[in-house]
Every structure is written in structure tokens, then in C-alpha cells.
Image (cartoon, helix red, strand yellow):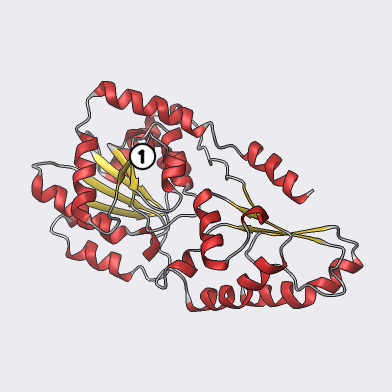
Amino acid sequence: MACGSLFIYFKLPKILKEDKVDVFWGTQHCLPKKNKYTKNIKFVLTIHDLAIKKFKTVGSFKNTLVQKIFLGKSMKNADEIIAISKATKQDIIDLYKVPDNKIKIVYNGANISKNSKEITNEQEKEIKEKFSIKDIPYIFFISTIEPRKNVETLIKAFNYIKEKENTNLKLIIAGGLGWKYENVIKLYEESKYKEDIIMPGYISSEEKVYLYANTKCFVYPSLYEGFGLPILEAMANKALVVTANNSSLPEVGGDVAFYYNDTLNYEELGKKVMEVMKLDELEKSKRIEKGLEQVKKFSWEKCAKETLKVIS
């Protein structure tokens, strides 16, 4: 990213002029330098999140340095800025003092996995065997394993639930290992309930759909999200959602998701998960139906149309 940012900022302006470009849309938090080559080119910048700016522990040194060098300059160079949520827009205003009228909110769409009914009986049997969940309840998480996703608090909450409840509940933590994942692995190894924690790494789309559709609840305790697509994906597959009450997560989850307030408080998270698992069938059905309606508010078609208005 560092080399790419250097190229975009310093080398690209002349190329854009030579290619007679009218609009340059920066989707990686970096825009070219304003100079004689770019005076007739409209610059649009999309900001996905400002996690690196807000939390020192969530970004690599290289990415943090790149954003520190180029992000402020790029915001200044932008004619218009696209924020993917109200929360992200407010962060831009608070952290970079960008005028409100320069920022347009364009929500992402939802990555909807194919319907779980397409999974065959044989696939279902294989999935149950692979994850050791035949007739056993489980809670589910999927994302890259890195500090921002707050998986440590999730494991602690699971330990808390197992201490408080006489349950054969399992925890499935799916997703590849990102950076600074070591503390998560350490907590997993040290857990008294390690045998009930399943960390399969990457999983197939069929496995993901099945796990969403059959979980007691999908738990997403992230410290910060510019948008939070997994919440919508979970709702689209009829999962109940427990998530943190921070950043953009309440925008995406609406009045469908269940929230806990102190993001690092594993006891509060554990209690909220237990509360959701004990809902009666009528309340579950209502939440699932509301979730399917919530997902309809976010589409890539809508995102594309609104983005086109900004860059036109």
C-alpha cells in the first residue's frame, strides 16, 4: 500500500492529464496531489473507516504511517468525500475538521450468501461432522482474527457462559488469522472449555450459510466498524445478532440486533448472549422477519446509483 500511495499521490497526476481523465475516484484512502496536471479533474474520495486513526492497536505500523502521511492531504484534495455510514462521516468531521457539506453518506450493500435451502442433506451431514455440532447448540462468529474484531472478549464471554450455565454450547470462531492474533490463540489454548471452541480458519460459502442459519446467535463484538457487513449477512440468513453498541453497528443492525454497551466487558456480552438464547419462539420469529426487512435497506444497486451521483 505504501508504494501504491506514493505512486498515486506523486506520479499519477501527470498520467491522469495525459489520459484526459475527468474524475478520479479514490477507494483506498488516497488521492493524487493537486497540481497543474489535476486542476480540471474532479477528485472523489471514499472513506471506509478511520479505525487506524481512532485505535493505535488496530493497524500495522506501515498502514498507520501511510494513512498518517496521505489521508489528511487526500481529504483536503477531495472535491467530495463518500462516507459509508453516518458514524464514519462523524469521525471524518471530528478527526479532520472536514466541512459537513463536503461529505456524502453512501451505505454499502449487503453480501447475501446463497439460500441455505440449496445445501444438500449430504453437505449438511458433512458440516455437522466437521464442526462437531450434531444436535449441539452453538454461537457463531466469522471475520478475520485481529485485535479490532475483539475476539478475546468473545472467548472470555463464552467461558463466562459455560461457568454460569450447565450447557453443551459450543463456540465457532471462523475466519483467517490476521495480524496480532496471538492473544486470541493464547486465550483459546488456556480456556477450560477449549474442547467446545472450534476455530476452523477459512470456511466455504456453504458452511458459512449453514452456520449462520442454524446458530443460536451470531456474535459480532467488534471494537469499531465503518459499516459491518457480517451483521447484514447474518440477518439475511435468518440469524439472531448480538453486537456491540458502537461506531456504525447500530446503523446497520437497527432495532433488530441485540446490543451490549461496554465493548470490552465480557460479562455483559455473556449475559446478552444468554438472554438471546432464551428468547421464546415467537420473539425469535419476529426478530428474524424484521432482520430480513432490515437487509433490504442496503443494496449494491442503491450504493452504485448514489455513488454515481457523487462522481458525476
Looking at the picture, does residue 228 appear above or below residue 93?
above
Q: Nearer the viewer, residue 55 or 151?
A: 55
Q: Residues within 10 Å of mark 1 (few under 14, many from 20)?
A: many
Name the amino acid type tagged 1.
Leu
Q: Residue at x 22, y 55 (%)?
A: 266
Quarter of the rendering containing residue 180: bottom left
Q: Residue at x 27, y 21 (%)?
A: 282
Find residue 279 and report its horizontal and vertical position in percent. 22, 30
Looking at the picture, does residue 113 appear above or below residue 117?
below
Q: Nearer the viewer, residue 288 or 305?
A: 305
Quarter of the rendering containing residue 182: bottom left
Find residue 21 and report its horizontal and vertical position in percent. 86, 60
Q: Nearer the viewer, residue 65 or 166?
A: 65
Q: Nearer the viewer, residue 261 or 116?
A: 261
Horizontally, is 216 left or right of 68 in the view?
left
Looking at the picture, does residue 93 appear above or below residue 63?
above
Quarter of the rendering containing residue 38: bottom right
**Would residue 136 be seen by someone viewing this image from the given angle?**
no
Find residue 292 and report its horizontal and vertical position in percent. 45, 29
User: What residue is shown with label 1?
Assistant: 211
Q: Residue at x 25, y 23 (%)?
A: 281
**Would residue 293 be seen by someone viewing this image from the given angle?**
yes
